[in-house]
Amino acid sequence: MTKNIRLPYTTLIKGVWYYRRRGGRAMRIEGDPGSPKFLKHYDDLKNGRPLAPTGRTIADLIKSYKASRKFASKAPRTRRDYDAVMMRLEAALGYRTVDKFERPDIIRLRDDNRDRVRLANYAVQVMSILFEHAKDVGMLKKHHDNPAKGVSLLKSEAPPREPWPPAKIAEFRATIPTDDRTRLLFELLIGTGQRIGDVLKMQWGDIKDGGIQLRTNKTGARLWVPIGPDVQKALDAAQRRNLTILTNHAGKGPWSYRGAADAMMKARVSISAEKWDIHGLRHAAASEMATAGCSDELIASAMGMSVETVRRYTATVRQKVRAIHVQDMREKPKNRT
């Protein structure tokens, strides 16, 4: 690449050329600018061809996957999560040869991290993704099975997260004033059923046609969420001091995750609700929808999550709803006698 020629989707950062499409991840272009190696790698990136591996180790595989279009297409939150796990995998297993891995190796990796269930399960899932990529780039012969595919995940011994009970939701509203910034955060969390990171990014300009438009950080799903009366009341009481709805104390920028989490903890302590965390409001939103008669499929569509996740969130409340329905059916014959 010469000074007077600029290839599409390239950007120069601290003397290094990167390839990046809008909304995608910046990927370094290998080779000297303008060299055949540079131009070939640029063409591979532009046409979605993964970087050809130079070796056969797990470290080589991770490098190849991180340079691929598949990885670049993941949501920023997902890429960060994958990066954290792949860094651990490379440190522990980077020297291992890809085609020498067998199913017992993956099970051993899982069980060696049994004391950290989430990490152990995520390691298995990321390894499965890496081995599928290995097939795509020829590091794993087609007749070789993905050794991580089908390996069972560990069951967490931690108690399941509980949704906020109606009594605590009512107590929060009775204790925290409507014009308080923490109250607005609370109403947006339970009213939209979104994660705190997505709520903190919401802008006044996202409010259209009686709802809030957003794109979830974790999955990249585009949603339009209706604004209910409790959310609208809190929005009406809020001051518009910045583009973002929830601002920092000075009103000159978005509220930080840590600041928002600390404010919520202070409010939870004030009503003895430490048992129910911020994510429990997402569970509460799903539970309210289920109690109102919404199907899991309908809730999944409204909240931008998978049906399987919704079923986990609503399992307890659905059992109660069904039990009440059964009891009502039992009482009907008695009432007719």
Image (cartoon, grey):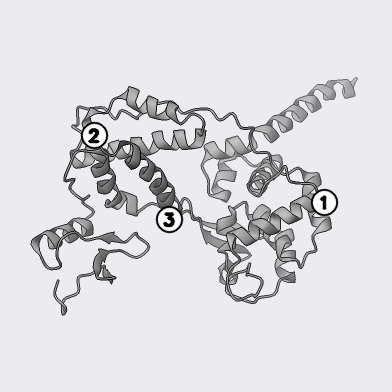
Image disc number at residue 76:
3
Dividing the image into 4 quarters, which one contains the N terminus? bottom left
Whole-angstrom CA distance, mark 3 to mark 1, is 36 Å
Tell me the CA gap for discs 2 and 3: 27 Å
The residue under label 1 is 171
**Which element type, helix, strand or loop, lies under badge 3?**
helix
Q: Are marks 3 and 1 in contact (CB under 8 Å)?
A: no
Q: Is residue 146 above or below residue 171?
A: above
Residue 78 percent coordinates (x, y) = 43, 49
Label located before the other in sequence (2 or 3): 3
Closer to us: 10 or 324: 10
- Please provide percent x and percent y for residue 158: 61, 32
Q: Nearer the viewer, mark 2 or mark 3?
A: 2
- 67 left or right of 124 in image: left
* Marks 2 and 1 in Cβ contact (< 8 Å): no
Q: Is residue 233 left or right of residue 197?
A: right
The disc at residue 307 is: none
Amino acid on which disc 1 is placed = Glu
What is the total number of numbered labels drawn onto the structure image?
Answer: 3
Quarter-of-image position of residue 96: top left
* Residue 68 x %, y %: 27, 51
- Image-quadrant location for residue 35: bottom left
Answer few, some or many: residues within 10 Å of disc 3's Cα (few below 14, many 20 plus, some between 14 and 19).
some
Label 2 sits on what residue type? Val
The answer to whether residue 167 of the structure is visible from this angle is: yes
Q: Which residue is mark 2?
A: 98
Compared across the picture, whether 337 is left or right of 110 comes to: right
Q: Which amino acid type is shown beneath numbered disc 3?
A: Pro
On screen, 310 above or below 218? Answer: above
